[in-house]
Amino acid sequence: MSDLILIDTSIWIDYLHGSPTVSKLQNLLEENLVCTHSWIEGELRTGSFKNRDLFFDSLNKLTIIPTIAESFVFRLIEAEKLYGRGLSIIDINLYASAKAEKVKIWTKDKSLNQICKQSNLVYSGN
């Protein structure tokens, strides 16, 4: 699964708003290189945008990487000293999921991006 890229909520929002900074996402989708996570879908479902039904139908056709058990995430927080770094529990679970599935993450979140870089899990969108 290592060729897949987990698209974080921040990138999806830019994509939905037609931002040219994430134009590469369309190519990744066409090449079937995009995966998602249930917590990203959850965050997106709280937003308001056009064509919701079509978007979520398409999102649900992507590979979904599993959520990691809280006990593992809590151990990871301690083991990698992920506390005090501006990361939410969602960020850390996405990171843990990407790490377990060996996929890269494309995000605009600076704190998440930083830990992904340290583990060679960052995708820059280039």
Image: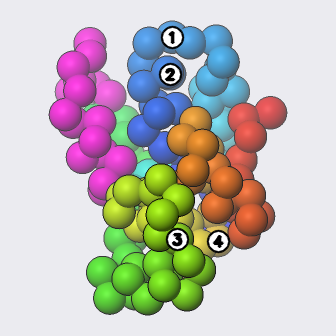
Query: Which of the marked residues, 4 or 3, is nearer the chain's N terminus?
Result: 3
Residue beneath disc 1 = 18
Mark sitting earlier along the chain (3/1):
1
Using the numbered discs, state the Cα–Cα distance from disc 2 to disc 4 in whole angstroms: 24 Å
Residue 121, position in %: x, y? 69, 61
- Whole-percent x and y of residue 106? 61, 44
* Of callouts 2 and 3, the N-terminal one: 2
Q: Which residues are magenta?
A: 38-55
User: Which residue is nearer to you in this view: 18 or 71?
Assistant: 71
The residue that disc 2 covers is 15
Determine which quarter of the picture holds residue 88.
Answer: bottom left
Residue 2 position within the rendered picture, expressed as x and y whole percent measured from the top left: 69, 66
Question: Which residue in the protein does label 3 denote?
Answer: 82
User: Residue placed at 48% from the left, 63% from the top?
Assistant: 84
Q: Is residue 73 left or right of residue 69?
A: right
From mark 3 to mark 1, how far is it between C-alphas? 33 Å
Asked where in the image residue 17 lies, by quadrant, the reply is top left
Q: What's the amino acid at mark 1?
A: Gly
Residue contact at pointers 2 and 1, CB within 8 angstroms: yes
The answer to whether 51 appears left or right of 68 in the picture is: left
Q: Residue at x 50, y 22 (%)?
A: 15
- At label 3, counting other C-alpha atoms closer than 10 Å, the crowd grade (few under 14, some 14-19, many 20 or more) is some
48 falls in the magenta region: yes
Please, is residue 84 above or below residue 47 in the view?
below
